[in-house]
Amino acid sequence: MKALVTGFEPFSGERVNASIEAVRRLPSRVGGLEVVTAELPTSYARARAALEAAIARANPDIVLCVGQAGERAALCVERIAVNLQHAEIPDNDGALPVDTPVVAGGPAAYLATLPVRPAVAALHEAGLQAQLSMSAGTFVCNHVFYHLMHFAAMERYRFRGGFLHVPALPRPQAGNAPSMALEDIARGIEIVLGAAAPGLETRNQRPGTRD
């Protein structure tokens, strides 16, 4: 089996994005999974094409997209992608959408098809701060998560998908702002992948919702 894991480029004037830094640290295999990675632009206009191209190249069984949520202190396994994009800060192209759909006419929301509760339980068992999240926000992370699950619902693709939000990396100038060590973030991604693999159904079966 093969897993595609994506992270985002830095945004909002930052020089580092914890998601792509952690993704770059992943080994080429996690248990029985071959792992391939890709970097996505923090752009409403460009992220979809980059994600779809990465999926087409990898032909994965599992896709886990990873994004940074600087205000969060825990690894957040996302459950719901909503058909809404709304930016409080501009993306890397300067876009500031206001209450627009990710996919016009698409479903209001999609649920992740990776086993979200077992993933959170496995993270806790490993001693990592983690929680099940019911909102991936409305910035580019949710935009990518929604497109990921929209692709999975189409006949063209056969994979299970999900999204993991990670804290920012420690920064001396950030004071007491939430953060997590890079090693722990990378280990958390590996744990989520390990939790996703055992219950994977065959590629000939249409993906269903998992709790």
Image (tube, rainbow, N blue to C red):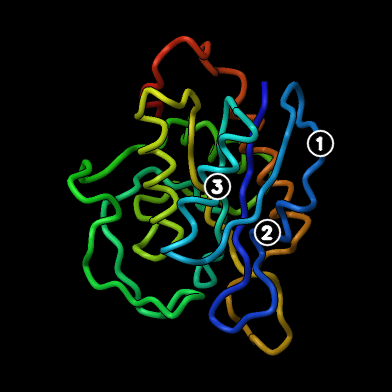
Q: Which residue is mark 2?
A: 20
Q: Residue 46 versus residue 101: which sits nearer the camera?
A: 46
Residue for badge 3: 65
On screen, residue 90 above or below 103 = below
**Direction left: furthest residue:** 105
Please give left or right for residue 158 compared with residue 123 in the image. Answer: left
Residue underneath mark 1:
28
Q: Name the spot of residue 133 as percent of width and height, x first.
A: 41, 51
Q: Residue at x 71, y 80 (%)?
A: 171
Question: CA gap, disc 2 to disc 3?
Answer: 10 Å
Q: Earlier in the sequence, mark 1 or mark 2?
A: 2
Q: Residue flagged by tag 2: what amino acid is it?
A: Ile
Image marks 1 and 3: residues in contact by CB distance under 8 Å = no
Position of the N terminus, as image quadrant, is top right
Q: Check disc 3 and give the amino acid type.
A: Cys
Residue at the image position 21 percent from the left and 51 percent from the top: 104
- For the residues marked 1 and 2, what is the alpha-carbon distance in whole angstroms? 15 Å
